[in-house]
Amino acid sequence: MSEDAPVNSGAVRRPDPDSAYLAVRRMQIKLHRWAGEDSSHRFGDLFNLVHDPAFLVHAWERVASNAGARTPGIDRVTVAYIETRIGVEEFLDGIRSALKSGEFEPVEVRQVVIPKSGGKLRKLGIPTVADRVVQASLKAVLEPIFEADFLPCSYGFRPNRRAHDAISEIHFLASSPRNYHWVLEADITACFDEIDHTALMSRLRGRIKDKRVCALVRAFLKSGVMTALGEADETVAGTPQGGILSPLLANIALSALDEHFDRQWREMMSTDKRRRTRKRKGLGNWRIVRYADDCAPRTLMEVVM
């Protein structure tokens, strides 16, 4: 695919959900293949996929079938309200028109606070249904591209990967003949809240050259928060937990961590001889296993003998 070639069919007919799913999957497979074939390729002309009828229908199905479909954003609109009062087709047509004309603007997320284990609290940001649909469409476009770059050590919020897979990897590395004996666990403090927007957008632009897609992602990052007291706060950092796009953006940001330790491994610990030499010098050998923001700089470390 040339850098500037359009990647969708330009169809305007609204497909049924099954046809939309198949069309989206076919395009995702192509995007993933193109990304895998050339790690330096930067994708242009992706914005037309974000507002493509098939991608919007698929995004709606994802949002409407989610457990949070009954939870409104700051506009108090729910999926049920759209289905009974507005009509799904009219709703999606409105989103498509706003995206195509450049008039679409994300609004503040509605902040809610939920309890965590240990008595702590977690802040969630609930987008409006319209913003959720656009985020779901954006994710469907971006995820197959970045999945081609993500390393195997990353398990959280990725297709066909789960916590049990990360646990199995730890057991594998701790077993003979690998014999990594120490497991050091860590959690990145306020990871979603503290992600640097400039650094994240830099990594995004490493793969995406479509300025409209980058601007839309940045608009979601900067959309702000409406607190429980009704006060609007700016978002100068972070991506709110509760947004459909946030886990993918967090993985894009944290992939820098994966690449750092992978580079250390390949340069210093990738052979038995190198690992034995490090142990004789009193140095450790390690591998990282990351599940979202739960990880460690030295997740699995050999005993230094």
Image (cartoon, rainbow, N blue to C red):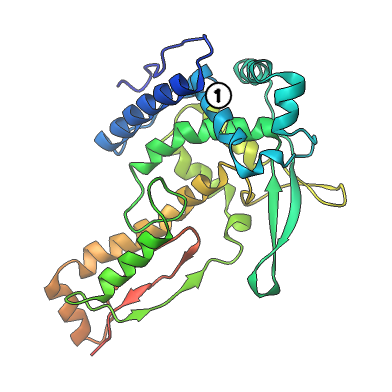
Q: What residue sits 23% from the left and 62% below the top?
A: 266
Residue 154 image position (x, y, % from top left): 38, 56
Residue 27 image position (x, y, % from top left): 38, 25
> How many numbered marks, from 0 up?
1
Residue at the bottom extreme, as displayed? 305
18 in relation to 121, above or below: above
Residue 262 image position (x, y, % from top left): 30, 60
* Residue carrying label 1: 56
Answer whether residue 288 is visible to the viewer in this image. Answer: no
86 in relation to 305, above or below: above
Under circle 1, the secondary element is helix
* The C terminus lies in quadrant: bottom left
Q: What residue sits 30% from the left and 81% below the top?
A: 181
Crowding around mark 1 (Cα neighbors within 10 Å: few <14, some 14 to 19, many 20+) is: many
Q: Is residue 146 left or right of residue 84?
A: left
Answer whether residue 199 is visible to the viewer in this image. Answer: yes
Q: What residue sits 48% from the left and 43% below the top?
A: 202
180 in relation to 193, above or below: below
Q: Is residue 172 left or right of residue 240?
A: left
Nearest the eye: 131 or 117: 117
Nearest the eye: 297 or 178: 178
Q: What residue sits 47% from the left and 50% below the top?
A: 157
Nearest the eye: 156 or 206: 156
* The N terminus lies in quadrant: top left
Residue at the right extreme, as displayed? 229
Q: Amino acid at mark 1?
A: Leu
Residue 270 image position (x, y, % from top left): 19, 66
